[in-house]
Image (cartoon, rainbow, N blue to C red):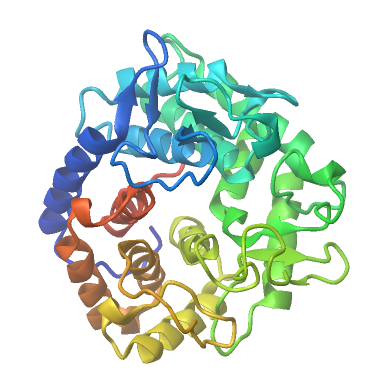
Amino acid sequence: YRSGVIYPAPQAEMDAALVAFYQEWKAAYLVEGCGAGRAYLGVNADGKWDAGTAAMPITVSEAHGYGMLALVMMAGADPEAQRLFDAMLRYFKDHPAASGPGLMAWKQVEGCGNAAEDEGGDHTATDGDLDIGYALLLAEKTWGNAGDFDYGGEARTVIAASLARVVTADDTLLIGDWAAEAAGFAGATRTSDFMMSHFQAFAAASGNARWRALRANSYRVLQAVVPPETGLSPDFVIGLPDVPRPAPPGFLEGETDGDQSWNALRTPWRLALDDLLYDAVEPRRQLAALNVFIRAAAGDDPARISDTYRLDGTTLPDDWQGSVAWVSMFAVAAMTDEGQADWLAALWRRMLDTRLQDEDYYGNTLKLLAMLTLSGHWARP
């Protein structure tokens, strides 16, 4: 990481906590199944996923990317990491999107098939594929390409497919491969998909400068929609490329589509990684504003961090407080500011005090990914 980054605890303490939680998380969510030598991250392995009236999912591409990232970055502590990573790669290759190879069908359900067409099960979700591509680049660096898979070749296939099918001609990022042809969605994006450090790595690995153009354009979008007083990002943005603005309520997922809610809670983490890994200056003003805002809003108590914020910093009447997903993402943001040491330590303690059984797949997985980052183990290819 760049100089000046702060950490929440001594290295030995962070490493011990990371390994212990990883082992819990792996036992709870990493599932070997859907064929010999296959594995996936079970989003309902703890029985907490609410599928409503739809078929119960076993995994989604977002989770698959998270799982592959965790395995390759924990390779030094887990002798099973490469075997399981390869099993997840086989599963990925078993479930290509309807648009073609290189990208993953978004959701699989009980029985191991893709979700129904009316759920968009064989379409893509951009974040899952971007994380899978990044994990494959890390696998190439970690294990080389002489095993069962040419990780570098697989990575470049995912990178090229992503550029072709979810990046527009004017260098904006689509929500998925379906959005370009869907009325009202071609000019929309999700701020938590702005994986700026991924874009830097993809540019280097592919030699294609469009990834750097996408990164620059994504920062321009944030500058247009993020209030400088709070640093909060909306879940979804519409009006691209000319007039980016927060999405209205009910745009895609619910009434909070224009707020920092369960999608954009990840945006601070994604931005902080660009700062930590590449010494990027572009996200620092937003992260600084966000750190000041959240400390004031929570009264320096991580248990009072809410589960959704309107961009002006107000909360919803029925907000839920103290989720480890939110605490973890704000903890990573705090690493970038030397003045946040006490706050970062408090966030870390809240993370450690939150038991795996008290959260679900999403909260526990974001906690693990944040712990990898907080302990200095998030890697770049």
Q: Which is more toward the observer, 215 or 60?
A: 60
Q: Which is more toward the observer, 255 or 282?
A: 255
Return the x and y of residue 153 as percentages of the image width and height. Answer: 58, 20
At 66% across and 42% down in the image, what residue appears?
203
In this image, 215 relative to 294: left or right?
Answer: right
Return the x and y of residue 178 as percentages of the image width and height. Answer: 76, 39
At 27% across and 74% down in the image, what residue appears?
344
Residue 166 against residue 239 in the figure, above or below: above
At 58% across and 88% down in the image, what residue appears?
312
Return the x and y of residue 50 as percentages of the image width and height. Answer: 43, 48
At 73% across and 51% down in the image, what residue appears?
173
How many numbered dots are placed on residues in this image? 0
Residue 109 against residue 213 in the figure, above or below: above
In this image, 96 relative to 60: left or right?
Answer: right
For residue 208, say whether it is visible: no
In this image, 237 relative to 261: left or right?
Answer: right
Examine the image and state in which quarter residue 97 appears: top right
Residue 189 against residue 245 in the figure, above or below: above
- Split into 4 quadrants, where in the image is the N terminus? bottom left
For residue 51, say whether it is visible: yes
Q: Which is more toward the observer, 115 or 192?
A: 115
Return the x and y of residue 224 as percentages of the image width and height. Answer: 73, 76
